[in-house]
Amino acid sequence: MLNWILFILSPIWLFVIYRIINRLIRTPRVGYTGKYIVITGCDTGFGFLSAKQLDGLGCHVFAGCLTEKGEDELRKVCSNRLQTVRLDISKPESIRQAYQVVKSKLPPGKGLWGLVNNAGIAGKRGRLEWFELSDYKFVADVNLYGLIDMTMTFLQLVKKERGRIVNTSSMGGRITMTDLVPYNMTKYGVECFSDGLRRSLTQYGVQVSIIEPSRFGTNIVSPEVTAKAVNAAWDEASPEAKEEFGDEYFRLYRKCTLEDRAASAAPTTITDVTNCYEHALFSWLPKVRYVVGPLIHELMANLPIPETLIDRFLEFIVWRGVVITPAFLQKQR
């Protein structure tokens, strides 16, 4: 009997030992002083807090902000080391201008220790039939193409220091929500680009990490932003799509989605994410992927769970147990 108990418990102990050793190996840090880092999307959320956090550690931060308000708010809480840069990563000319600013302010012969691609948007939220091709392009211009453009523009400066690139993906880059497909597609793209980039840069000594946050209490998932995203998807849907689904379907979908946002707005400890940024930038042995959020999401992404079960679980998350049928299908009954 004792042998069976030991046999059952041995994988658990091995996992615990692995986690302890893994943490000990990755704990040592390289120095913070004299490190120059570019961060995108610093107006709010992860970018804002990360810029403030790294500035407090003594790093020289170039904080990319979309708005003047974002720049002003960041300067109020940071030292003179931090320099804000107006940056819209969906516009190549804005990225080129930011590059020239950063390059001109680096000390002679100095490159970048880190590039944190944090900026991102959620886009519209709704059924696939409510979207146009332009909706996919709008999100991709920021989340994917903007990230790629930033990386390739600043890459030589990072190579110069044998530094780090940190790309913000999402659990949505491995698990697709039915009402966030344009967003999810871009995050799948970030995963692919980051894997290819990491393997390409091995000989240069540049390390690439992917951050995969779950849902945190940032502006991108606030109830106000979510309501706007849902309304925009429905308001701009084609007449045929509106007729197919009907106003009652939209009303219940909107209600369930906003209740879901309100219920998930509680986890505001976004330092869990910014601490991963810091670890990826300064750990002696950074991880390839940082999954940040509830254990259930990590299990869904990594365990061999049948797709049909995941589909049902995600459907329950979206609809919160409510059963609603499109108007078109109701007429066929």
Image (spheres, rainbow, N blue to C red):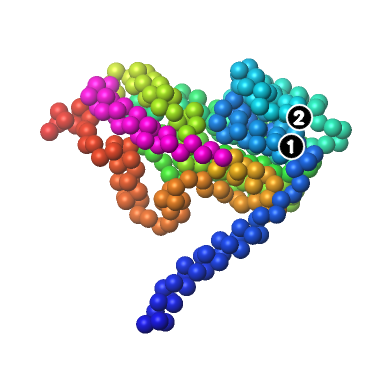
Q: Is residue 84 above or below residue 12?
A: above
Residue at the extreme left of the image, as rendered: 333
Q: Residue 4: x percent and y percent?
A: 39, 79
Q: Which mark identifies residue 81?
A: 2
Residue 12: say if magenta: no
What amino acid type should be assigned to the residue bearing mark 1?
Cys
What amino acid type should be assigned to the residue bearing mark 2?
Arg
Q: Is residue 264 above or below residue 43?
A: below
Q: Is residue 191 above or below residue 250?
A: below
> Judging from the image, what secondary structure is the residue with disc 2 in?
loop
Q: Nearer the viewer, residue 40 or 84?
A: 84
Q: Residue 255: x percent and y percent?
A: 29, 28
The residue located at (43%, 57%) in the rendering is: 303
> Judging from the image, what secondary structure is the residue with disc 1 in?
loop
Q: Quadrant of residue 20?
A: bottom right
Magenta part of the protein: which range? 242-271
In the picture, the quarter occupied by the C terminus is top left
* Numbered circles on residues, count: 2
Q: Nearer the viewer, residue 178 or 70?
A: 70
Q: Quadrant of residue 143?
A: top right
In the image, is 291 to the left or to the right of 49? Answer: left
Residue at the extreme right of the image, as rendered: 108
Label 2 CA crowd tier, 10 Å (few <14, some 14–19, many 20+): some
Q: Which mark identifies residue 59?
A: 1
